[in-house]
Amino acid sequence: MHFEDEPPEPMVLKLPPLSDELAARMYELVQDFLEQYEHCYQYHIHRFYSERERERRELRAQMLFERTQQSLPLDDDPPF
């Protein structure tokens, strides 16, 4: 069923088939792109987890420091 306010069917552009040379070159370019993307992705994943691990270690060190500060006797505390 076709209504007047509906857009017409999209037009399809008919192109001749690609030459084998052009298809092979396009395949190489896509492969190069995917390889570079994978390297970039791996780099960012590594950086993310390294940063998260560093932040976790800093937080743990800060918590340990605060705990040791709380357990140290103050100068004006009488000795046991």
Image: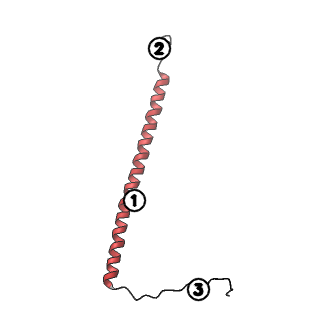
Point out residue 48 in the picture as x, y percentages from the top left corner: 42, 50
Which residue in the protein does label 2 denote?
75
Quarter of the image containing the N terminus?
A: bottom right
Q: What element carries label 1?
A: helix
Amino acid carrying label 1: it is Tyr
Mark closest to the chain's N terminus, 2 or 3 = 3
Residue at the spot 48% in from the left edge and 28% down from the top edge: 67
- Left-right relation of 58 to 4: left
Rendered image quadrant of residue 32? bottom left
As shown in the figure, which amino acid type bears the numbered disc 2? Answer: Asp
Q: Name the residue under label 1.
A: 41
**Residue drawn at (40%, 89%) of the image:** 16
Of the numbered discs 2 and 1, the one sitting upstream in the chain is: 1
Residue 60: where, in percent of width, then height? 45, 36
Q: Which of marks 2 and 3 is in front?
A: 3
Q: What residue type is labelled 3?
A: Glu
Q: Residue at x 32, y 79 (%)?
A: 24
Q: Distance between the residues labelled 2 and 3?
A: 86 Å
Residue contact between numbered discs 2 and 3, judged by CB atoms under 8 Å: no
